[in-house]
Image (spheres, rainbow, N blue to C red):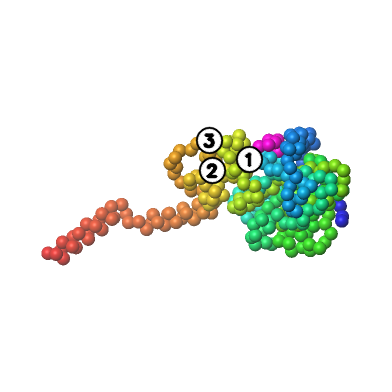
Amino acid sequence: MATIARRGISAATNADEKLRQHGFCILPDVEPGSRIEEINRSLHPRFAATPFCQGGFYGPRTKRFGGLLKRAPVVESLVQNPAVMRLVHAILEPWCDTVQLNLTQALELHPGAPAQFPHRDQDMWRGPTGELEYLVNVMWPISPFKAENGATLIWPGSHNGGQGDDNTEPVAIEADPGSAIIFLGSTLHGAGSNQSNAVRRGIIVSYCLGWLKPYENQWLTYPPEVASAFDPELAALVGYQQHRPNLGNYDGQCPSILLGGEPPDHLAAIDALRPDQEGALSEFLRQQTDQLPPAGGIAEIERGRNKREVKSNG
């Protein structure tokens, strides 16, 4: 098994190009170490209280929990990191009107944890593969990721619907806290085995097309009374926005209306259309107006009809 260290492919100046070419890239030092340490401290009690996962996929020597925006609000800086969001929008926006948060999840890999079953996260949706990307994953090391402690394994070139060779040797992605490991939802990957004597912690943040059902049910995780404390962009990211045209509305309006308190019982449905649809609608309405009879025209037609009926009866 090869190792991709903190430089090499990871140090590419054109992360977008590397992500599309290899199915993954690394953005080094995009968050300060002090912030990562703050996140680590805030999550420590929950890691201690969380039981080990059940089942062979998640792993019996692994701990996981989600809902990080309410459990450690400082995670917001990871979710909205500008360098990461630029890549996310570049990959996903050709296929959707809005991007949404798919999940935030903290992971703790304990000594003796076996390697995870290699998988592609896009397989959650069973849609067509090879033409579009459904998902972008961002792994944030909380402790240093090293080959011996179970660093994420990635199969380079296995993305784009699995057109690459899955039999190629995986690489262990080594990275320090503050760096972001980014890989596509179509990229084959899995956690490595932890052969060290220490736990390995990380946070996975992922983003998906706005018209998909996300892995983590964001509306239950962040109900209005929680999401109302978020800034508008973050609230939109967790689902308090519509995906045009009109998808994900609340009683015909943008669900962000719920963030201002209890809405009225009776709401008027409001169009939420893309610009191209607005243009087509405007043209359609203009044509309908042009085809209407002039003012008073219908009354004149009725009077003419009545005169003809009187004449024929006479």
User: Gap in Å between the C-alphas at discs 1 and 2?
Assistant: 14 Å
User: Residue at horizontal 62%, vertical 36%?
Assistant: 230
Q: Which residue is mark 2?
A: 255
Which stretch did the figure color magenta? Answer: 70-77
Q: Which residue is mark 1?
A: 234
**SS assignment at label 1:** helix
Say which label, 2 or 3, has the lower sequence index: 2
Q: Is residue 290 visible?
A: yes
Say which label, 1 or 2, has the lower sequence index: 1
Q: Position of residue 179 (x, y in %)?
A: 79, 43
User: Residue at horizontal 57%, vertical 38%?
Assistant: 224
Answer above or below: position of 221 versus 128.
Answer: above
Say if mark 1 contacts mark 2, CB within 8 Å. Answer: no
Secondary structure mostly seen in the magenta stretch: helix
Q: Position of residue 31 (x, y in %)?
A: 76, 39
Q: Which residue is mark 3?
A: 260
Q: Is residue 75 magenta?
A: yes
On the image, which quarter does residue 306 sit in?
A: bottom left
The numbered mark at residue 137 is none
Along the line of sight, the residue nearer the viewer: 272 or 199: 199
Give the left or right position of residue 125, taking residue 15 as reference: left
User: Gap in Å between the C-alphas at discs 2 and 3?
Assistant: 10 Å
User: Residue at horizontal 77%, vertical 46%?
Assistant: 62
On the image, which quarter does residue 141 sit in?
A: top right
**Quadrant where the C terminus is found in the figure:** bottom left
Q: Amino acid at mark 3?
A: Gly
Q: Amino acid at mark 1?
A: Leu
Along the line of sight, the residue nearer the viewer: 215 or 54: 54
Q: Amino acid at mark 2?
A: Pro
